[in-house]
Image (cartoon, rainbow, N blue to C red):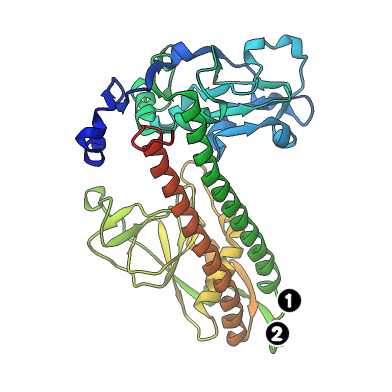
């Protein structure tokens, strides 16, 4: 195990081997059944939700959450509501401070461990809903803030995957959740671990908010600069409406066999999705090419491929056919009009965007290529700033994952 490479033999005397992993000698191992009592949520569908009533937690809201807790007092205005009489709801389905709510269904094994911890010191009525498993502590063995982190450890997630059943939909029962084993530090150390991890969470949260703010600023700039509402200094040429096909030539790609793709490689295969379908050792399209997804659920997605790549069968490559169009401006304009492009899709099972409809799509743009270049420069600088912040956010998230792996396993002690 990794722990063997980071600890001396003298240090290992203070550790013990358990069913979960090697942990500190003064830690315990308990099953979730020993720590919690489990019950199901109140059965109500999304169709029954409204703007009035009591706060309601649907399992889809847990899957969609970006954090591991729900603070009812500060977030109640944004929580869905269920307008029913409270005395019709079982007390077991009412969520108090420190309660944990797991999902009992997921589209993949990874999602089976999804959960939130409830922060509800004020005792605001909060109803656990459909496809949720409510876990209420039997005693005070677990610190409430520590609960927000302890189930994110790899060893715990692996147990959730092991007990998940189903093919298309993975589910986990109350009986199986009760079998999951968790290493348990003393309360003082739990608090110290939670404090350290919460500090980096504050950094992650503040950075995420800053990115959202910068994106909103860029969106506002796009609405003004890419519509001609606001002109940059020194430019006064008119703007005109032109058809997509009069400016751009579309080339559809070639499908690769799955056997030709790998998880890593030199060239990405762009085949209609928002992420590469895989990687390959060959390419058929030069770098710095704009693409538009032709088919699939993400058809209409606009991408700028900065390296050589393989253009797949469900993707269009764009070639500018005029000297009066700046490529970077075109990308920004298409990205701004992306929703309108997606509205060109036809079909339901496997939607697609036909070349004819895309060629007839109208673009409103400046006739001065120098103005186009200047506008693209302003927006690219904004993109660069956002990308830098996103890289910092990714580093913080990696740092948090590393901290959790050593703190939640006792490889590094705080107390």
| Residue at the extreme bottom | 234
Disc 1 from disc 2: Cα separation:
13 Å
Label 1 close to label 2 by CB (< 8 Å): no
Label 2 sits on a secondary structure element that is loop
Along the line of sight, which residue is nearer the eye, 177 or 263? Answer: 177
Quarter-of-image position of residue 58: top right
Along the line of sight, which residue is nearer the eye, 111 or 353? Answer: 111
Q: Residue at x 47, y 80 (%)?
A: 321
Residue holding disc 2? 238
Q: From this view, report whether residue 3 is shown above or below residue 268.
A: above
Q: Residue at x 67, y 74 (%)?
A: 225
x and y percentages locating residue 39 in the rendered image? 55, 12
Residue holding disc 1? 230
Q: Residues within 10 Å of mark 1 (few under 14, many from 20)?
A: few
x and y percentages locating residue 146 in the rendered image? 51, 30
x and y percentages locating residue 69 in the rendered image? 58, 33
Along the line of sight, which residue is nearer the eye, 247 or 357? Answer: 247
Q: From this view, report whether residue 368 is shown above or below residue 292.
A: below
Q: Residues within 10 Å of mark 2 (few under 14, many from 20)?
A: few
Residue 312 appears anywhere in the view:
no
């Amino acid at each position: 195990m990794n722990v063997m490479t980071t600890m001396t033999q003298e240090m290992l005397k203070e550790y013990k081997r358990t069913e979960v992993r090697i942990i500190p000698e003064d830690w315990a191992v308990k099953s979730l059944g020993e720590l919690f009592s489990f019950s199901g949520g109140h059965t109500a569908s999304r169709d029954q939700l409204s703007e009035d009533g009591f706060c309601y937690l649907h399992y889809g809201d847990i899957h969609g959450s970006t954090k591991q807790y729900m603070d009812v007092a500060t977030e109640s205005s944004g929580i869905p509501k269920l307008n029913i009489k409270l005395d019709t709801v079982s007390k077991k389905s009412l969520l108090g401070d420190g309660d944990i709510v797991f999902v009992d269904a997921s589209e993949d094994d990874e999602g089976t461990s999804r959960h939130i911890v409830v922060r509800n010191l004020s005792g605001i009525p909060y109803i656990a809903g459909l496809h949720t498993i409510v876990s209420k502590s039997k005693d005070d063995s677990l610190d409430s803030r520590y609960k927000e982190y302890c189930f994110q450890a790899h060893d715990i997630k692996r147990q959730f995957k092991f007990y998940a059943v189903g093919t298309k939909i993975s589910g986990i029962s109350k009986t199986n959740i009760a079998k999951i084993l968790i290493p348990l530090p003393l309360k003082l150390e739990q608090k110290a671990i939670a404090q350290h991890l919460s500090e980096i969470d504050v950094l992650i949260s503040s950075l995420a908010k800053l990115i959202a703010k910068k994106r909103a600023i860029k969106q506002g700039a796009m609405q003004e600069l890419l519509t001609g509402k606001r002109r940059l200094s020194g430019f006064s040429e008119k703007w005109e409406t032109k058809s997509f096909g009069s400016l751009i030539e579309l080339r559809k790609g070639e499908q690769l066999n799955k056997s030709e793709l790998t998880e890593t490689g030199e060239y990405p295969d762009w085949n209609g999705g928002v992420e590469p379908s895989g990687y390959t050792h060959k390419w058929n399209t030069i770098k710095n090419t704009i693409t538009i997804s032709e088919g699939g659920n993400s058809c209409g997605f606009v991408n700028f491929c900065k390296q050589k790549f393989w253009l797949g069968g469900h993707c269009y490559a764009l070639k500018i056919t005029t000297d009066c169009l700046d490529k970077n401006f075109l990308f920004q304009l298409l990205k701004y009009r992306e929703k309108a492009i997606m509205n060109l899709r036809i079909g339901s099972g496997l939607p697609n965007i036909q070349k004819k409809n895309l060629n007839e799509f109208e673009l409103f743009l400046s006739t001065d290529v120098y103005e186009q270049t200047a506008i693209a420069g302003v927006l690219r600088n904004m993109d660069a700033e956002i990308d830098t912040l996103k890289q910092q956010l990714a580093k913080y998230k990696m740092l948090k994952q590393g901290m959790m792996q050593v703190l939640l396993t006792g490889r590094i002690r705080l107390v």
